[in-house]
Image (cartoon, rainbow, N blue to C red):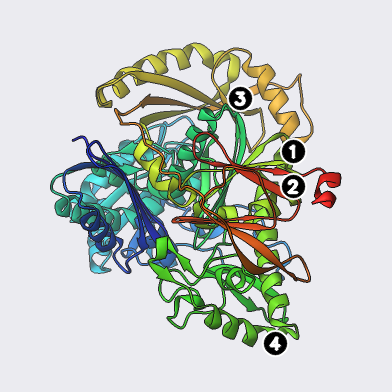
Amino acid sequence: MDVQVGVDVGGTFTDFVVVDPERGRLQLKRPTSRPDPSVGILAGLQELGVTSCVLSHGTTAATNVALERRGPRTALVTTRGFADVLTLGRGQRLDLYALLPPPRPTLVPPELCLEVDERLDSRGQVLRPLDRAECEVLAQHLVAQKVEAVAVCLLFSYLSPDHELLLGEVLSAAGLTVSLSHLVDPQPKEYERASTTVLRAYVASSLDRYLDHLSRSLKQADLWVVRSSGSVCRPEEAVEQAVGCLLSGPAAGLQGAWQLAQEQGLSRIMTVDVGGTSTDVALCDGSLPYLVESSVGGLPFRCAQTDIQTVGAGGGSIASLDAAGLLQVGPRSAGSQPGPACYGQGGPATVTDALLALGRLPEQLAGGRLKLDRQASLRVLEELSVQMHLPVLETAAAIVALAEHNMAQALRLISLERGYDPRLFVLMAFGGGGASHATALAEQLGMKRILVPAHPGLLCAQGAMLAPWQAEEQRAWLTGLAEAESEVRSWAAEARRRLKRKAPSGKLSWTQQWEIRYQGQGSSLWLPGGARLSERFHALHLRRFGYQRIHQALELVSTLLRAKVDRPRAEVPTLSPASNSPTESQAYWGLPPQPGKIRVFQGYPEEWVTGPARLETMDGTVWIGAGWRAQRVGNGGLTMESLPLEEEHAE
């Protein structure tokens, strides 16, 4: 199949990028169909005239099930005495200033957190065997309770899985869908392992139905699914490792951003991906960043994933007043239905409405497919401004400023709070709204250069199409670092043989990650494998936490081996829109907002353009703030630079 397609389903839009040897590059943005996103995918492919193809899909199917709490009735089975593991969680206070913090979120009600009388010790030796008859009684009880999915998480099962395997056999025979923790997350820390296993049980069946329907509808398509690690896998693998698809779409965007950075010769970038519902940020210092622990909707989970942080601030984020009468933006979003007020469907005031009112957005999006009603935006903003006792445009400017503050806080979290100086990085802005906020964000972090892709709103779809195949194997050790190295080499050799058997044809490349901590610590750090592990750990610990203990023994917690195969793919041509003669428009900027005339360009200009100015493309809008200039670069993208103060005043 020579036709390659990348699809990304977002909260507001579904994006398509097609590379066809005969027709070249095709692209499309259309509103995401609700409640079934596959309807919009099929309609988009039909509109593009695509039937036989290789299709790589970034999906929010698993994420939405978890966030909207619409999964099957799920139970947890654990070792006697540990039924409260999900309720107790960890000791951290999620909200430092809440006198009466809300209960910890969980997907399993207390009455379905059940126990079996068994126990292993910390070396995996049996202290109390599991009785099969007890398992059969438990299975009957779960069926009577109309449970559909069961997560099994027994203490120390990652060291010896026999008890979990017995439970899985009996429960499956009773017609229940079972997730076993030693297969889902074979690592220490029973709370995180239990939460990950429950999440897998909760989302797997919905993801299976969604991908099965999509596969059957796309009979002539070779379907791949993007995982949180920025790689692709087959639909059946995606279901088997369902938690690995919880951050599918953002990972595809980071994959596309990193490839573009490499083409530009950049090794240090910070990315900001602003969509309709949220903003995703990441920091790449010489390579894609990975981690193994994250959360969705307050539910922690562990799997190999790119290190992306998310904040609930996007174009559709709703502006409202809290109980104290203070302005808040997000985390609730208007999505695509009803969408922002300017969509003309009775939606609330959002960031998009504020930008439109200030003249920082055009009155149509997605190449004219979506007309925006500025008067509708002004009406809902006026209702809010009356409550705030501010003029309408000041209210709009405050909404934008607060959203940008929340985005900048996320960027500080991944840079300054981890020991990185953001001024040494280039900010890459994409998503439908990334370039609308980029200059303001860069100013808040002292960054001097911004790069915007040729098609910022389609980068996640393009990243999905370019994503490689990857598979991982992980092993827990909990032993001294020096003592473990020979055992790790033996395990890695066997793991390589297993992963080779799973890999598609192509050149395999390997990376290894080591999770290390000071002996006695509860937290750990991940480092790439290789020489000078101890030295590199001490240096990373110093940068991350401000101190190091050179003479303290190090403990190896786990190792992760990753195999990668780049899929055969065609080059993705760039359809950089040519800029014509600019027009003039009225806009407002600053706090309080000041009016002025700006130049408006269709596409990216060949010459340097000094802000304030607005650049419009089919899939995104670029706002060049005051004190910045922008110019199209060789690959069709856009570079923006901060002007020196004397040059800014001269302009």
N-term-proximal mark, 4 vs 2: 4
For marks 3 and 1, give the one nearer the viewer. Answer: 1
Q: Is residue 27 above or below residue 355?
A: above
CA–CA distance between discs 3 and 1? 34 Å
For marks 2 and 3, give the one nearer the viewer. Answer: 2
Q: Which quadrant holds residue 469?
A: top left
Outermost residue toward the front in this view: 581
Left/right of residue 411 with respect to residue 122 in the rendered view: right
Tags 3 and 1 in contact by the CB under 8 Å rule?
no
Identify the residue position indicated by label 4 in the image.
Answer: 387
Tell me the kind of residue under disc 3. Answer: Glu
N-term-proximal mark, 3 vs 4: 4
Tell me the kind of residue under disc 1. Answer: Arg
N-term-proximal mark, 3 vs 1: 1
Residue 17 visible in the displayed image = yes
CA–CA distance between discs 3 and 4? 57 Å
Identify the residue position indicated by label 2 in the image.
Answer: 445
N-term-proximal mark, 2 vs 1: 1
What percent of the width, then of the height, locates residue 416?
A: 74, 42
Which label belongs to residue 423? 1
What percent of the width, then of the height, locates residue 622?
A: 58, 54
